[in-house]
């Protein structure tokens, strides 16, 4: 536990130190769009529910609106950029400050518009609309006087800010409950058309710096293995559901092509594609090398090995079945696990993911002079 945490902290500290000396690092704020991989409290605030303990136990010490034992990958990225954690757009309690950006990501969000059966109404198009309202309101406040400067971004910050995206996982994973693999693969262009439309709308509003994460190995999540991996012939060499990972790979291939297309269409922008799939797949395949003991099994769940996941119980939840009360509890040391609750990663796994993103070697194009601090790192 200690050795891997020290290593990841050293990586991130090195990044921060080099960044401090980089005069050309020009991201004064971050505007994030996504799902639960980067939701810092939006869905909980928007739907009016409490994320239950033991979520948040390891860093915040209390639930923070994140579906994790601590920090998310986006939190570590903000740290590395010497920026504060992003406040959720819909969370108005606690005097949130949006001077350095805003987080529109909401757990269970999809790229495609939400339907009546969706778990989350804040799909990507809604998040983009929320951003437009946020920007318009911020500029209204700035126009009223300088007293609002320390709370909201000014127009210059909107133009120079980084626009981050981590969404698409739920479009694919959710589709497997009602569609065949071939149908899902055929739907990917439609999904990405919706993403392209949102990004173009942001560009038209002045956004120029885009950082786009692809989707991770969905087939390696305990939730999907429990539902779709009961037949061993459907699993790959890592014990992951092959069909889900095939869908993710196809989605990522087309997303990469979209990023290349957008960069060609908008030569005055910077579009960075980040290969999260490779980072997470490498972590799962070589978990012991990075100090983890459990590559697949959830830390917080119910049922014990091999998955410790029960779809009837979310992390921290207590229910009674056939007269017996059971609780989905956390393991003794979450840093030994990659999976927190069968769907989301632990803080330690998120820290690893962030450390790899910030090497620059999983990005296309490789980090340029717009992020010179990354080129100076040696791993």
Image: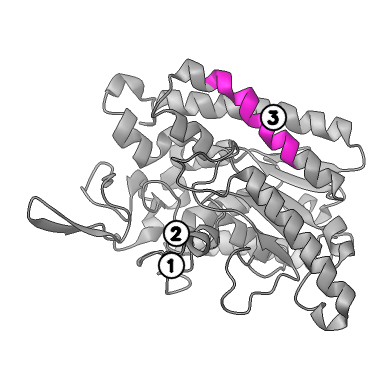
Identified at 28% across, 23% down, the residue is 232
Confirm whether residue 56 shows in the render: yes
Q: Answer yes or no: do the residues labelled 3 and 2 have beta carbons within 8 Å?
A: no
Residue receiving disc 2: 68
Quarter containing the N terminus: bottom left
Crowd tier of the residue under label 1, counting other residues whose Cα lies within 10 Å: few below 14, some 14–19, many 20 or above: many
Q: Is residue 305 magenta?
A: no
Give yes or no for residue 190 being in the magenta stretch.
yes
The overriding secondary structure of the stretch rendered in magenta is helix
Residue at 53% x, 38% y is 169
Q: What residue range appears in magenta?
A: 185-198
| Helix, strand or loop at mark 2 | loop
Question: Residue 143 at x, y = what percent?
Answer: 89, 73
Which mark is first along the chain, 2 or 3? 2
Classify 318 as above or below 362.
below
The residue pinned by badge 3 equals: 193
The residue indicated by pointer 1 is 56
Relative vertical location of residue 190 with respect to residue 266 in this rendering, above or below: above
Dot 1 or dot 3, earlier in sequence: 1
Q: Is residue 367 left or right of residue 349?
A: right
Which structural element holds mark 1?
loop
């Amino acid at each position: 536990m200690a050795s891997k945490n020290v290593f990841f902290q050293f990586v991130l500290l090195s990044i921060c130190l080099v960044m401090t000396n980089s005069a050309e690092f020009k991201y004064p704020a971050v505007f994030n769009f996504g799902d639960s991989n980067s939701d810092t409290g939006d869905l909980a605030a928007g739907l009016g529910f409490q994320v239950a303990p033991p979520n948040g136990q390891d860093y915040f010490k209390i639930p923070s609106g994140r579906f994790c034992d601590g920090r998310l990958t986006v939190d570590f990225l903000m740290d590395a950029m010497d920026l504060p954690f992003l406040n959720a757009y819909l969370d108005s309690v606690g005097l949130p400050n949006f001077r350095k950006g805003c987080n529109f990501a909401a757990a269970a969000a999809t790229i495609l518009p939400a339907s009546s059966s969706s778990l989350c109404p804040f799909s990507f198009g809604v998040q983009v609309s929320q951003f437009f309202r946020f920007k318009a309101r911020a500029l209204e406040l700035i126009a009223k006087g300088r007293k609002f400067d320390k709370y909201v971004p000014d127009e210059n910050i909107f133009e120079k800010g980084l626009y981050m995206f981590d969404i698409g996982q739920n479009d694919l994973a959710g589709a497997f409950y009602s569609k065949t693999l071939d149908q899902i693969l055929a739907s990917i262009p439609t999904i990405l058309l919706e993403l392209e439309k949102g990004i173009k709308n942001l560009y038209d509003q002045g956004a120029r710096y885009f950082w786009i994460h692809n989707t991770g190995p969905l087939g390696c999540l305990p939730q999907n293995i429990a539902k779709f991996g009961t037949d061993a012939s459907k699993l790959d060499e890592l014990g992951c559901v092959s069909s889900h990972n095939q869908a993710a790979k196809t989605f990522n291939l087309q997303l990469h092509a979209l990023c290349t297309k957008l960069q060609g269409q908008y030569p005055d922008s910077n579009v960075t594609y980040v290969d999260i799939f490779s980072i997470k797949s490498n972590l799962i395949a070589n978990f012991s090398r990075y100090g983890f003991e459990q590559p697949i099994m959830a830390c917080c769940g119910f049922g014990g090995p091999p998955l410790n996941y029960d779809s009837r119980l979310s992390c921290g939840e207590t229910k009674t079945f056939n007269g017996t009360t059971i609780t989905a509890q956390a393991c003794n040391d979450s840093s030994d696990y990659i999976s927190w609750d069968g769907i989301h990663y632990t803080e330690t796994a998120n820290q690893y993911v962030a450390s790899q993103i910030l090497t620059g070697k999983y990005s296309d194009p490789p980090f340029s002079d717009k992020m010179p601090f990354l080129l100076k790192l040696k791993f």
